[in-house]
Amino acid sequence: MHDLEPHYHWRDHYVASEDKRSPFYGRVYDEFRFTQKIYNYFIHPQWDYFGSPTLYMKILYVDYDKGFAILEMLGEWNDCLQNDVMYLKREIVDHLALHGIHKYILICENVLNFHGSDDCYYEEWYEDVNERDGWICFMNLLNHVEEEMRDTQIQHYVNFGEAYNYDNWRALKPKSLYKALNRAIQGGGMKFLPQ
């Protein structure tokens, strides 16, 4: 797991630790010491801790003018034991919402497991973004993670599934990914993503 590094090709466009409006503003990263763990596995030091002992993240890009954020996730999403969605909502989403963010893209290909509980925080998050004509999209979920999310009924609040999966997202610029997902959500599913 220590080899899984957050996507870094967009650093010319955005760096969360340098953004005064980011919840991670001023954070300093040690590239030589691995101190954070998910269970007994060290993870790359670029991942950000936000309250969950099993789920980490990286804010890859934020566009305050268009009101969207792209987050990459890593680990086990455990609402049942850790209430991870509460940490995500309170520590990250609520903070970004204060600065006008109402559209969220979460890249979840490195979310290895999901353990659902209830849908209260997802419903609250949905209501918050829906007031501003926003949305939430989870991209590239593993099949078993998607099944567990459907069992928890969060598909009523979050866009996810095959229509929102795209393996080659790293080849895009952040605004191109946003535009494609926004079109897909408005049109009921992704038909294609531009290269």
Image: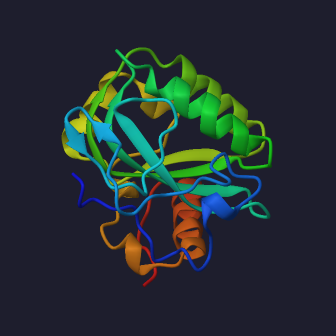
Viewed as shown, does residue 79 lie left or right of 119?
left
Could you say where residue 132 lies in the image, as x and y percent from the top left? 78, 43
Q: Quadrant of residue 53?
A: top left
Q: Foreground residue, 143 or 8? A: 8
Horizontal arrangement in the rendering, residue 134 relative to residue 184 (left or right)? right
Q: Residue 83 in the image: x percent, y percent?
A: 44, 20
Q: Nearer the viewer, residue 109 or 21?
A: 21
| Residue toward you, 180 or 75 | 75
Number of dots carrying numbers: 0
- Classify the position of the C terminus by image quarter: bottom left
Could you tell me which residue is drawn at 35 percent across and 42 percent down?
Answer: 36
From the viewer's perspective, is residue 64 above or below residue 74? below
Q: Vertical placement of 2 versus 83: above or below?
A: below
169 left or right of 114?
Answer: right
Which colour assignment does the render follow? rainbow
Task: Name, please, the residue furthest toward the bottom.
Answer: 195
148 relative to 137 in the view: left or right: left
In front here: 87 or 140? 87
